[in-house]
């Protein structure tokens, strides 16, 4: 992104880890996390200054401007964003308080991650910043904060660490939501709606631009489910309390019944994807039917089912328990399963000659699906 900086200029390197960042690019919502972090640093630094100077009514003029952080470089690998302090006159009037604030925040994160005692010099009144910092990240995405004096490791800011920091003073926390459900009520005057997710009725609010999508989903709720992405409020048990805002909402054909969806996939002809895309192969259809029988026999949640351009089938589950599961059946009948949760990512594979009712049962039994209501 730019030429390498003098290490002395680097204030912190924020390494974003997760599949979204594997091509060393930073989505715009992740860039916003850096601005949130800078505000966090500033407020903690103000607190430290006022604690050291109790006779003052406010911080000195120019205090906030002296932080002056800028995004200088995104390194290869995961998206490693270098935040540097711009030196306009060769000397910064208040360097120590910002460095101390950065290090204190890191100590808070590290204390939760390693089970150590929480720093008693961190002000409880500023813990709310942890609810703001990291809010756009998915449960399987982390930020590693590396300071110049500790370039080997840094501290890892995970979904679980963030949640525990927020819950030190409040009973709920905000996080990204990616879920599927059925819209069962809408109030266009209040821009509110209710959606049924895994048997639970969740209240939510929507921006005006989503009004038509919400109303259409409500009108077709008997046959159409929706996939939604946005921000939600969760309790300490990771249960959805409320949907705060939407970023995306899209209708899908009903998941019920599963065998009808498989029949639909048989009708896909070559070129179904804007002139591209192979017909779903007989091998993929055969394997999908095996998984259908296991899901129904074990009374497991049904997935959304899509064709893949290569002639395979993809199944997706997205739950309110921060579990995301993708099962891809290749055109030859091979199976690739990815389970993402706050505890990490698990990948399993089956070759075509390994697929059977028994192996499919073992594969699905390892997934901790929430109990159906």
Image (tube, rainbow, N blue to C red):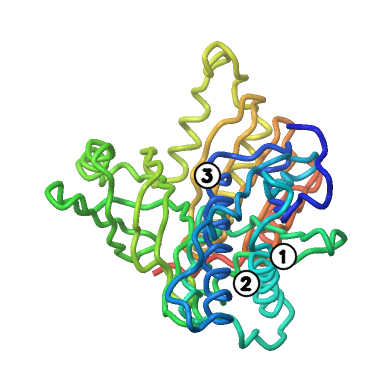
Instruction: Tell me, for residue 156, which label it has, or none.
Output: 1
Residue 220 position within the rendered picture, expressed as x and y whole percent measured from the top left: 24, 41
Residue at the far top: name it.
275
Residue at the far left: name it.
189
Circle 1 SS class: strand
How busy is the neighbourhood of tag 2: few (under 14 within 10 Å), some, or many (20 plus)?
A: many
**Residue pictured at 72% horizontal, 44% vertical:** 79
**Residue pictured at 39% horizontal, 47% vertical:** 256
**Residue pictured at 23% horizontal, 36% vertical:** 212
Circle 2 SS class: helix
Asked if disc 3 and disc 1 are in contact, CB closer than 8 Å, the reply is no
Asked if disc 2 and disc 1 are in contact, CB closer than 8 Å, the reply is yes
Asked if disc 2 and disc 3 are in contact, CB closer than 8 Å, the reply is no
**Residue 40 sits in quarter:** bottom right
Label whose residue precedes the other's in the sequence (2 or 3): 3
> From mark 3 to mark 1, how far is it between C-alphas?
19 Å
**Residue 143 sits in quarter:** bottom right
Residue position marked by numbered label 2 in the rendering: 161
**Residue 217 higher or lower than 167, as above or below:** above
Left or right: residue 287 versus residue 258 is right
Circle 3 SS class: helix
**Residue pictured at 60% horizontal, 19% vertical:** 277
Label whose residue precedes the other's in the sequence (2 or 1): 1
> From mark 2 to mark 3, how far is it between C-alphas?
20 Å
Instruction: Tell me, for residue 29, which label it has, or none.
Output: 3
């Amino acid at each position: 992104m730019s030429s390498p900086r003098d290490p002395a200029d680097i204030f912190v390197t924020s390494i974003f880890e997760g599949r979204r960042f594997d091509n060393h690019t930073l989505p715009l919502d992740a860039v916003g996390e850096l601005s949130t972090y800078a505000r966090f640093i500033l407020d903690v630094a103000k607190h430290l200054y006022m604690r050291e100077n109790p006779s003052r009514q406010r911080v000195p003029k120019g205090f906030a401007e002296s932080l002056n952080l800028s995004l200088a470089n995104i390194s290869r690998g995961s998206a490693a964003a270098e935040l540097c302090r711009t030196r306009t006159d060769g000397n910064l009037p208040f360097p120590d308080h910002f460095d101390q604030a950065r290090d204190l925040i890191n100590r808070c994160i590290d204390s939760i991650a390693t089970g150590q005692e929480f720093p008693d010099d961190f002000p409880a009144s500023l813990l709310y910043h942890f609810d703001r910092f990291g809010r756009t990240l998915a449960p399987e995405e982390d930020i590693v904060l590396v300071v110049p004096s500790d370039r080997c490791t840094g501290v890892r800011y995970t979904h679980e660490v963030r949640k525990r920091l927020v819950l030190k003073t409040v009973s709920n926390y905000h996080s990204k939501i990616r879920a599927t459900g059925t819209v069962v009520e809408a109030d266009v005057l209040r821009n509110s709606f209710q959606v049924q997710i895994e048997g639970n009725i969740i209240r939510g609010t929507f921006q005006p631009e989503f009004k038509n999508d919400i109303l259409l989903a409500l009108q077709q709720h008997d046959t159409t489910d929706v996939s939604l992405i946005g921000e939600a409020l969760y309790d300490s048990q990771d249960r959805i309390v409320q949907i705060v805002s939407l970023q995306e909402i899209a209708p899908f054909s009903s998941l019920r019944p599963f065998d009808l969806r498989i029949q639909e996939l048989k009708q896909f002809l070559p070129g179904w994807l804007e002139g591209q895309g192979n017909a779903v192969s007989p091998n993929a259809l055969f394997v999908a039917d095996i998984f259908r029988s296991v899901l129904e026999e074990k009374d497991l949640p049904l997935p959304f089912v899509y064709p893949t351009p290569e002639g395979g089938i993809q199944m997706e589950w997205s739950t309110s328990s921060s579990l995301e599961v993708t099962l891809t059946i290749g055109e030859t009948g091979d199976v690739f399963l990815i389970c993402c949760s706050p505890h990490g990512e698990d990948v399993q594979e089956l070759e075509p000659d390994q697929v059977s009712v028994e192996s499919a049962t073992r594969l699905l039994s390892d997934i901790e699906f929430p109990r159906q209501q």
